Amino acid sequence: MTEPTGTSTAKDTVAEPRAKEASAADGPAEGLTAAQCVRGVAGPIGRLGGAWMFDEQTNARGEQLGLSRWSWYHCGRGGVLGDVDASVVVAAFGFFPPALQSKAWNRGRGVRPVGDTAQDYAQACADWGRRTFGSLESAGRLADLLGGALAAVDVAGLPLFAAWRVVAAAGPADAPARLALALQAGREHRGSCHLVAVVAAGIDPLQAVVSGRYGPRNAEFFGWAPPWPDPQVAREAMVEVEAVTDRLVEPAFAALPTEQRAELVEGLRALR
């Protein structure tokens, strides 16, 4: 299998789904329910929590370390789990071809310890945050609000999120970096909940990818070789999977007082 030459993460993928965002029809911002908060933050978290992975400076850092972009991504994102067998990372990520992911992991593992790569990957996220949110006055407040919600999550069944939550909590003290790492952890939270929902629905990873919002082109992006299954086979089932994902994510934001939910939604949706 040929190793991809481009970036190795998918935009708004099935693994990091984006719920229908809250709108004025959902009620006034000051009276947001936890479910409305889930819809309101999903888009910004999905977009900003993954944007740093596409950043040129982020990927240049991987090249400096002697890693391909594919190994940089899989060892950087998955290295928080420790120096484990590739099958553990396949299980935690869920939506990539196992052979491709195992190859990327083992190659990166052969270049340098995955724990070191994970530390450098988290540092790249923090550095992106400083470049992106350096002048944002609300960065610290938003990091506190999102971090507070994520701290309330029961991590059972969510090992990748649990590991990134630890990284975020132990990360740099400056507000822009904290916000970037909180967004990354928030992205892993929804992504991990989504994987649980997909598995519970009995949908295999490739079918979930092609039946998601971006269809077969996302399967190609993830590295799945054609032929791909018919997207219509699980289209309706994936609608229910998204609803289950929302429900699994909801307890985190139920932990915030109503006014803090509104503040978080408004603050994150204002970010560009």
Image (cartoon, rainbow, N blue to C red):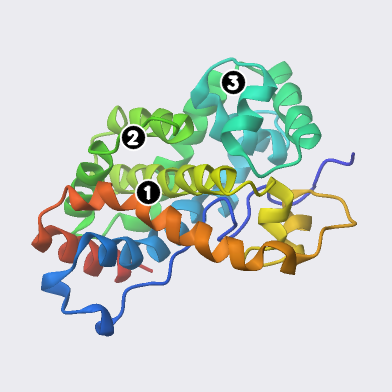
User: Disc number at residue 168?
Assistant: 2
Residue type at tag 3: Val
Q: Name the residue tied to disc 3.
A: 114
Crowd tier of the residue under label 1, counting other residues whose Cα lies within 10 Å: few below 14, some 14–19, many 20 or above: some
Kind of residue sitting beneath label 1: Leu
Query: Which quadrant of the rendered structure holds the N terminus?
Result: top right
Return the x and y of residue 222 as percentages of the image width and height.
72, 50
Which residue is more in the foreground, 107 or 135? 107
What residue is disc 1 on? 248
Q: Quadrant of residue 261?
A: bottom left
Residue 229 horizontal side relative to residue 259, left or right: right
Please identify, in this view, whether the residue under mark 3 or under mark 1 is nearer the observer.
1
> Label 2 is placed on what type of residue?
Ala
Residue 130 seen by the camera: no
Q: Earlier in the sequence, mark 2 or mark 1?
A: 2
Q: Is residue 133 above or below residue 204?
A: below
Q: Residues within 10 Å of mark 2 (few under 14, many from 20)?
A: many
Q: Residues within 10 Å of mark 3 (few under 14, many from 20)?
A: many
Q: Position of residue 109 (x, y in %)?
A: 68, 19
Q: For residue 90, which numbered disc appears in the image?
A: none
Q: Which residue is at a point 45% across and 45% down the rendered structure image?
A: 193
Mark 2–mark 3 distance (CA, rounded to whole Å)? 18 Å
- Asked which secondary structure carries label 3, the reply is helix
